[in-house]
């Protein structure tokens, strides 16, 4: 097909095609350095980037990004050829596992990017992958030889790509305006959680015992957590006594390839999601801890203390960052040890022990002094069964994804081009939501992570005003910020969800019922505030023909795991949702579906979900608690205004999708016709 067109080599339409450098990363750096994880489905994602110093950035000035650049991942099995289009000038560089393509003035940069994203461009890029079952690579010399079709519609296609970006930004703005308007209507633009906290300690009770003068160390909640651990019937001991801390440095050998685990590779459920594969000389200086099967690695860095994981067979002999503690317990099995470090008491006691100015972390002496309960053996065995089942299911999911990659040609023939666009739009939606949340936090006066994550509050409740009313004894449930929220809501007419809508629960068929074809099975991971992503599994049509389906204006609300995600279905859809997703169908004509959906996604409900949801590893929001959620009811005219703003935002998103599809379709159709 390409031979039937006028083509030029990629190196003839670019000013620069090269691989990135091997920069010196530093925890104190402020300039993002992009790696493979920052390139996803056509977009550049700056979150979770590694950082370099400003001096290093200036030293590597030739690798600074410019608007119109296309970035391509060059390394990593299953990660080769991911594309990211640089749509704005930003202080950032890229690392050695990324290649850059910088177009010259003779070709439209956006058109070039659209072609590389098309099924033809992607197939030609993937054709250059080398390395077999080992470390896969893509070379810049191969990229230079790619044939680029020169067609009459290049500027038209390029304009569509940029127009799509413009509409995308408008969609972000529209959603932000809707949230801001809602807060304004509620009179909560200045809402902030109560930050008051204090404790009184004599010098003998504080510094002379601990050597610590920082007030955070003595907050009352930490004493409560210590008392909780001390009261465990089976006893407790200190981490230094129950665990071997493997902190000897390992020196990697040059020319030998290692798996390297860093903070970004740790999932929320205690799993290692990925790793970098580098030779000894390529590894950063912090890659000095060797791990083995059955070890538990625990982050020592404040802000990432919940980055804990169990080392499985796949990562036996890998290296990890010195930012982790590597542990093996002779009192607990690995699964129980992992669960303990993910639990609320131990997380808070680790936070208590953190110190430092710019980079705060918990030192070894403080870490060893943390008390942990000595869990009974029969309980440990039950915990281990559940954790191992979780690991097996994750491995099954990874294998399914790998199988999909091996059949990429079949997928493309069945609409792969559309799938690429769809996945990219989903990534855009998540990025948009993160930006909207930041704008919301700015509006309501929360301008730092400290306000949200580490504000410490205290309150006093009698038994008659706490447990006898709610059945809850956990202190977190009674934080003043919740009282403040409900006090603010009293200024409005309110109703509970029970008065507004009916709740219906779907099914949990189990992994044995999963199919490769059939009715899409939507789980919480497939649900976002902006829609449903392509599911990884399906269910049999006949077996589940009578299972509940979402109707027009049904609101899907997550109740397990990532609780409180709400999405309104525009039209009836033939999908089945998991038992972790509740179906809300409005029965009260006084409440509009779009308005209720926005309220459910706002902090008004998020705080109520945060208060109610329990669970140490996986949060659970009970349907009975959801039914009691309080919703402020604004006048119908205000709800209509909010609904129109939201509908405009979703309309712009559809337009974004349409423009991207049109751009890529023009490229593909032009090639096919010739």
Image: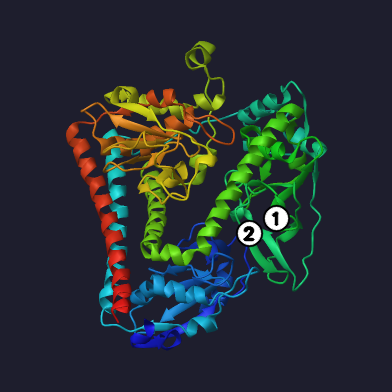
Q: Residue at x 42, y 50 (%)?
A: 434
In the displayed structure image, the side of residue 289 where residue 138 appears, left or right: left
The residue where tag 2 is placed is 275
* Pick the front one: 41 or 147: 147
Cα separation, mark 2 vs mark 1, equals: 9 Å
Q: Nearer the viewer, mark 2 or mark 1?
A: 1
Q: Residue 532, how many percent across, how many down? A: 38, 47
Quadrant placement of the C terminus: bottom left
Residue 349 image-quadrant placement: top right
Q: Is residue 7 above or below residue 498?
A: below
> Is the residue under label 1 in contact with that under label 2 (CB below 8 Å)?
yes
Which of pointers 2 and 1 lies earlier in the amino acid sequence?
2
The residue where tag 1 is placed is 315
Q: Is residue 67 in view?
A: no
Q: Is residue 231 above or below residue 209?
A: above
Q: Residue 557, how many percent across, how many down? A: 39, 36
């Amino acid at each position: 097909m390409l031979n039937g067109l006028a083509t030029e080599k990629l190196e003839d339409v670019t000013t620069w095609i090269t691989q990135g450098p091997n920069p010196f990363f530093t925890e104190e750096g402020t300039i993002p350095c992009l790696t493979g994880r920052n390139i996803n489905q056509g977009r550049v994602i700056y979150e979770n980037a590694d950082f370099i110093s400003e001096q290093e950035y200036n030293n590597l000035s030739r690798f600074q990004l410019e608007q119109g650049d296309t970035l391509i991942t060059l390394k990593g099995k299953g990660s080769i050829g991911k594309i990211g289009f640089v749509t704005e000038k930003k202080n950032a560089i890229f690392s050695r596992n990324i290649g850059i393509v910088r177009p010259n003035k003779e070709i439209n940069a956006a058109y070039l990017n659209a072609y590389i994203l098309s099924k033809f461009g992607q197939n030609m890029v993937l054709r250059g992958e080398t390395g077999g079952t080992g470390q896969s690579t893509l070379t810049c010399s191969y990229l230079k030889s790619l044939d680029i079709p020169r067609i009459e519609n290049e500027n038209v296609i390029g304009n569509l790509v940029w127009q799509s970006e413009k509409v995308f930004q408008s969609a972000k703005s529209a959603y932000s305006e809707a949230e801001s308007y809602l807060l304004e209507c509620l009179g909560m633009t200045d809402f902030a959680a109560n930050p008051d906290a204090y404790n009184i300690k004599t010098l003998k009770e504080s510094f002379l015992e601990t050597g610590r003068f920082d007030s955070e160390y003595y907050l009352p909640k930490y004493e409560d957590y210590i008392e909780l651990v001390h009261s465990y019937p089976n006893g407790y001991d200190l981490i230094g006594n129950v665990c071997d801390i493997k902190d000897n440095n390992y020196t990697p050998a040059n020319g030998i390839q290692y798996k390297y685990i860093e903070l970004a590779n740790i999932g929320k459920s205690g799993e290692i999601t990925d790793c970098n594969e580098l030779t000894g000389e390529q590894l950063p200086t912090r890659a000095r801890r060797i791990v083995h099967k059955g070890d538990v690695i625990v982050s020592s860095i404040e802000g990432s203390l919940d980055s804990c994981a169990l080392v499985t067979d796949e990562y036996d002999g890998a290296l990890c960052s010195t930012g982790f503690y590597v542990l093996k317990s002779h009192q607990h099995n690995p699964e129980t040890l992992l669960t303990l470090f993910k639990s609320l008491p131990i997380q808070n006691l680790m936070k208590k022990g953190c110190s430092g100015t710019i980079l705060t972390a918990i030192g070894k002496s403080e870490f060893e002094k943390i008390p942990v309960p000595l869990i009974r053996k029969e309980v440990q065995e039950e915990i281990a069964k559940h954790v191992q089942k979780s690991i097996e299911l994750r491995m099954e999911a990874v294998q399914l994804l790998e199988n999909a990659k091996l059949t990429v040609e079949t997928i493309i023939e069945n609409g792969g081009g559309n799938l690429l666009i769809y996945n990219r739009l989903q990534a855009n939606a998540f990025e948009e939501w993160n930006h909207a949340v930041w704008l919301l936090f700015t509006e309501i006066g929360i301008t730092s992570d400290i306000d949200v994550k580490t504000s410490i509050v205290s309150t006093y409740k009698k038994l008659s005003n706490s447990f006898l009313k709610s059945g809850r004894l956990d202190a977190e449930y009674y934080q003043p910020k919740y009282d403040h929220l409900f006090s603010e809501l009293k200024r409005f007419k309110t109703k509970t969800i029970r008065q507004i809508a009916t709740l219906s629960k779907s099914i949990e068929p189990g992994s044995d019922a999963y199919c490769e074809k059939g009715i899409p099975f939507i789980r919480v991971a497939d649900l976002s505030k902006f829609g449903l992503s392509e599911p990884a599994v399906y269910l049999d049509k006949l077996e589940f023909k009578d299972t509940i389906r979402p109707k027009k204006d049904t609101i899907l609300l997550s109740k397990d795991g990532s609780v409180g995600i709400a999405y309104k279905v525009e039209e009836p859809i033939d999908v089945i949702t998991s038992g972790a997703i509740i179906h809300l169908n409005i029965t009260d004509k006084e409440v509009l579906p779009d308005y209720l959906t926005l309220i459910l996604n706002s902090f008004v409900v998020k705080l109520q979900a945060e208060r109610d949801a329990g669970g140490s590893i996986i949060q659970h929001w009970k349907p009975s608690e959801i039914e009691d959620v309080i919703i402020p009811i604004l006048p119908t005219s205000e709800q209509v205004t909010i609904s129109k703003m939201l509908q405009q935002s979703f309309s712009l998103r559809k337009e974004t999708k349409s423009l991207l599809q049109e751009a890529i379709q023009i490229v593909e159709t032009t090639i096919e016709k010739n």
